[in-house]
Amino acid sequence: MSAEEYANKRDYYVQILGLHSGVNVKFRAFLTNFNDSWTSKYNSEEVYGRMDPIMTFQNTTRKLTVDFDVPSGAEGQATENFRQLSQLASSLYPGFSSAAGGASTISTAPLHKIKFANWITSGGQIGNVESNGLVVAIEGVSFAPNLDAGVIEIGPKILPKLFSLSLSMTVLHTEQVGWNLGSWLGSSNYPYTEEVDLGEGGQSFGPTQEEFEQQEEAYQQAAADYMLDSQQGANATSGAGMTLDIYE
């Protein structure tokens, strides 16, 4: 079985769809690197008299980096791979609309959907790039021909038999993800299509309503104590001289 037949049978392609352009490309997925990372951002405020900073949550972002090789076994395949690469490159530019006086203004950002098997997908389903592609802002595409693998010469054109692509992107969430009363709000298959065990009767694996209310009450009290301590620390900062006098 050839690599192309194997990729077709398993649908092992990196598929990319330009939401603003309609450009739809796919590459056989000979992955060389894959990184899927989540980062939670907090505003950190240092307060006099406290060992720990006050941490105020802002958001959680997700970034993807995918590197893969694109081989060509024949002239026709090399031409098609290069054509798809050219389409991908062109889809990185924004959409424009005409304005008064013949000027052009940016009307749409170059957002994309991307999909690969169950590693890059949305809605908890494998599906296809149109229905289950992950919406992303592609921040970088790097193309590198492998000259050791050789090239195919077609008149004045030179097509590499093998080239590498590296994509870096930020995921744009299209569904609500988070928790409410201990229940997950997003797809139960998030993010890699594996079903989450919710327990018997479809119950949440989080606390019960009564347990949640008890935890919420304890949390509110702890938050109030925390803010009181922070305020006292801030007051101590403004009266630092007086405090020193007491201990002198």
Image (cartoon, rainbow, N blue to C red):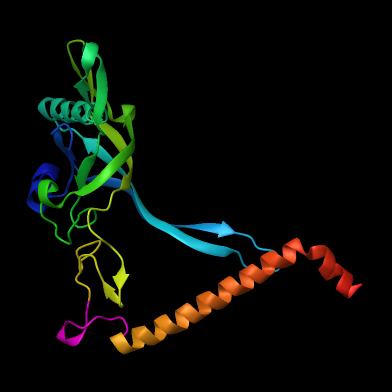
Q: Position of residue 62 (x, y in %)?
A: 35, 53
- Left-right relation of 24 to 212: left
For residue 152, above or below residue 193: above
Q: Residue 39: tell me if it is visible.
A: no
Residue 104 in the image: x percent, y percent? 24, 18
Specify the principal SS of the magenta part: loop
Would you say residue 206 sits in the magenta stretch? yes
In the rendered image, the quadrant that contains the C terminus is bottom right
Given residues 74 and 28, the one toward you in this image is: 28
Q: Residue at x 21, y 26 (%)?
A: 86
User: Can residue 141 be seen?
Assistant: yes
At horizontal 25% and vertical 34% (from top left) the residue drawn is 110
Q: How many marks?
A: 0
Q: Position of residue 210 (x, y in %)?
A: 32, 89
> What residue do we see at 50% from left, 81% from top?
221
Q: Say which of 31 and 187 sits in front.
A: 187
Residue sitting farthest toward the bottom: 210
What span is in magenta?
Answer: 197-208
Where is residue 41 drawn, in percent x and y? 46, 56
Task: Give left or right: position of 189 versus 10.
Answer: right
Q: Is residue 15 magenta?
A: no
In depth, the one of 154 and 56 nearer the eye is 56
As drawn, which residue projects farthest toward the right?
248
